[in-house]
Amino acid sequence: MEQYVIKGGIPLIGEVEIGGAKNAALAILAAAILCDEPVVVDNIPDIRDISVILSAIQSIGAEVERLGRHTVKITGKTIHMVHVGYDSIKKIRASYYLLGALLGKYKKAEVPLPGGCNIGIRAIDQHKKGFEALGAKVKIEHGMIMAETDSLKGAHLYFDVVSVGATINVMLAAVLAEGNTILENPAKEPHVVDVANFLNSMGANIKGAGTDVIRIKGVKSLHGTEYSIIPDQIEAGTFMLAAAATKGDVIVRNVIPKHLEAISAKLMEIGCQITEEDDAVRVFGNSELKHTQIKTLPYPGFPTDMQPQMTVTLALSHGTSIVTETIFDNRFKYVDELAKMGASIKVEGNTAIVDGVKKLTGAEISAPDLRAGAALIIAGLAADGCTVIDDIQYIERGYEGLDEKLRQLGGQIERVACEKDIQRFKLKIC
Ligand code: EPZ
């Protein structure tokens, strides 16, 4: 199994280019089947999860043509089935976006229950509530979610929980419904807004995405479009935290600074210098970092997908910090791995009490999930000595060329396939 081997203690210095947002791209690629004309989507990240959803879209009959590493053309006209096979999609949670898209277009859909990172209960009751409000019958049988109706009618829906997935999925089902749909208490993440903008570029009529109320006027049909995905807020934040934790100086390019405000604010609070340009953020982390309090919240609050990366940085900050995870109920699994590196973190329920230590030391650790895996890479880059990270498939499903981009910043990290490679790296670097 592939691993990353890292020699830590070197400040990251230089510039890095951010790719397209994974969590916008997964939804937009599913949404592309809502019309019969060709849809070209650009700036999609070249990662495993994207390949998985493209193969699922192809498996139901849509034409999928890769026009480049980051560009794909999808034509939904040739879709011949609304049943998505278990094998083609069980591993990614975003599979459920095909439910909203197929239900919205064909009034019927059968999709495997979603997989995804094991970071806590991944309920789908709000998706079901939304589809039923639009008139669909929804049942779960044999590991599949099945939704069907004669017609979809606009509805006024209040989400009991702020859910990115449910907000997007119900939008996908509502754009072709008869009449108006109002969504209250929706998610406001940048990728939710990106999906709404994409749908509007196809002729949908969605207003208010990114605010507390989304209003959708159902239209008869949608048409083809060309669209470019927004930059990935979480990839950008990951590099910002890597700069802080290694006391480096990194310019993160091709970002929307507004999407990073919560992360920038917390980095300034712990003593980093942050400067912003139109499409770049510079993180200067050379000072002694201080403790702070973090509470993950739906956007524009501090993102849950940045919680592990922030906790690693606080593990090296002076004083005691408190990190409260309010979105998922099992997102501190990486703390046991950090303990092997000398971190002093106590987890009580959904709160981590982080006593900053002077240094971390390299160790053999495993990535428990996507963002925790990225956080452990940051820990390895900041630690004294060598770190070997197992289960890197979790990391590579969500980050394109993370090791390569870190090497461009001076990080000593390599992807290895066996013990011999590790020894060779240690001889050469450690
Ligand atoms: C999306 O997951 C992202 N995944 C996650 O990113 C991200 O952490 C999450 O949004 C929150 O921002 C993708 O976009 C593919 P939710 P999603 O529905 O849609 C509860 C990553 O690292 N809930 O906003 O599954 C749920 O249990 C991944 O890129 C219900 O109770 O998240 C959770 O506690 C990890 N009922 C909370 O809401 C529902 O019907 C937020 O979940 C739906 C959700």
Image: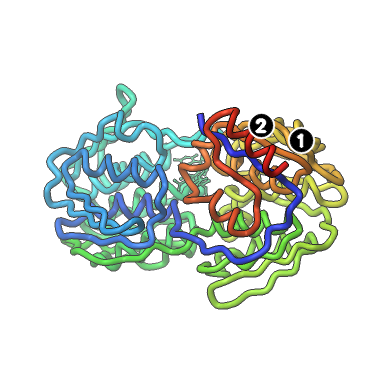
Residue at (76, 64) in percent of width and height:
272
Residue at (46, 59) in percent of width and height:
19
**Res 205 seen here:** no
Q: Secondary structure at mark 2?
A: strand
Front residue (pair 310, 220): 310
The location of residue 197, given as percent across then percent down, is: 36, 66
Residue at (26, 37) in percent of width and height:
147
Q: Which residue is mark 2?
A: 365
Q: Is residue 328 left or right of residue 184?
A: right
Front residue (pair 42, 308): 42
Residue type at tag 2: Ile
Front residue (pair 190, 138): 190
The location of residue 213, given as percent across then percent down, is: 44, 62
- Looking at the rendering, which quadrant does residue 406 occupy? bottom right
Q: Is residue 215 left or right of residue 252?
A: left
Compared with 298, 350 (above or below) is: above
The location of residue 322, given as percent across then percent down, is: 78, 46
- Do the CB atoms of the residues marked 2 and 1 lie less than 8 Å apart? yes
Outermost top residue: 142
Q: Which residue is mark 1?
A: 341
Indicate the quadrant containing the C terminus: top left, top right, bottom left or bottom right: top right
